[in-house]
Structures are given as C-alpha cells and as structure tokens.
Amino acid sequence: MALFVLTYGYHDTPLRAERRDDHVAHLEKLREQGSLVAAGPYTDLAGGMIVLRAEDESAAQALVEQDPYTQLDVTKDRRLREWRVTVGALAAGT
C-alpha cells in the first residue's frame, strides 16, 4: 500500500458548515477501513490535508471523489500526490 497526500483549500460556501458532519463521517469511515492515516484543517482554516493509504493513485482518487466536500465542490485547488516517507513512524519497517 502506498501513501497519498491530498491538500486543498475551501470555496466560500455555506455548504462547508452545512455538510461538515457528512465530511467527517466519510473520513471516519475511511479510518475504520484502514484507508485514512490522518486528516485535518490548517490552523488558519484556509484549507486542509488528508493522508490516505491506497493501492495506487487511481484508488486514492476514488476515495477523494467519495468525500461529500469533493462532490459538493466545497474544496478547491485539490492536489493528490503519492508520498514516500523515509523517516518517522510511517516509514517502511518502523
């Protein structure tokens, strides 16, 4: 399994607050399935980051597309990239 980092900003829309519970429920479901490593907003609340575990980029993108925030276009400037950890608790063999 590979790790992927999704970074994003937010559109100025009331849907962000209205659908936050659905977004968090989706993330919790991914965590329970073992696909979510970590997620959260930046401290300035201008955007956030999600670390996913998936077989490949296509599978990671499918997880992103299931998120209510993605489906409702709450997030913008989404960037999904594979991440190779070389040092730390997520590094292979640690």
Image (cartoon, rainbow, N blue to C red):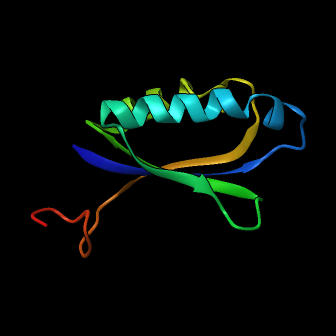
| Vertical order, 57 against 63 (above or below) | below
The quarter of the picture where residue 15 lies is top right
Q: Residue at x 82, y 29 (%)?
A: 18
| Towards the viewer: 72 or 30 | 30
Q: Position of residue 21 (x, y in %)?
A: 68, 31
| Vertical order, 52 against 72 (above or below) | below
| Vertical order, 92 against 34 (above or below) | below
Q: Position of residue 3 (x, y in %)?
A: 32, 50
Q: Quadrant of the N terminus?
A: top left
Q: Is residue 38 left or right of residue 3?
A: right
Q: Residue at x 80, y 37 (%)?
A: 16
Q: Residue at x 26, y 62 (%)?
A: 90
Q: Residue at x 45, y 26 (%)?
A: 62
Q: Position of residue 64 (x, y in %)?
A: 52, 33
Q: Is residue 30 left or right of residue 34?
A: right
Outermost residue to the left: 93
| Vertical order, 38 against 70 (above or below) | below
Residue 65 visible (yes or no): yes
Residue 70 visible (yes or no): no
Q: Quadrant of the C terminus?
A: bottom left
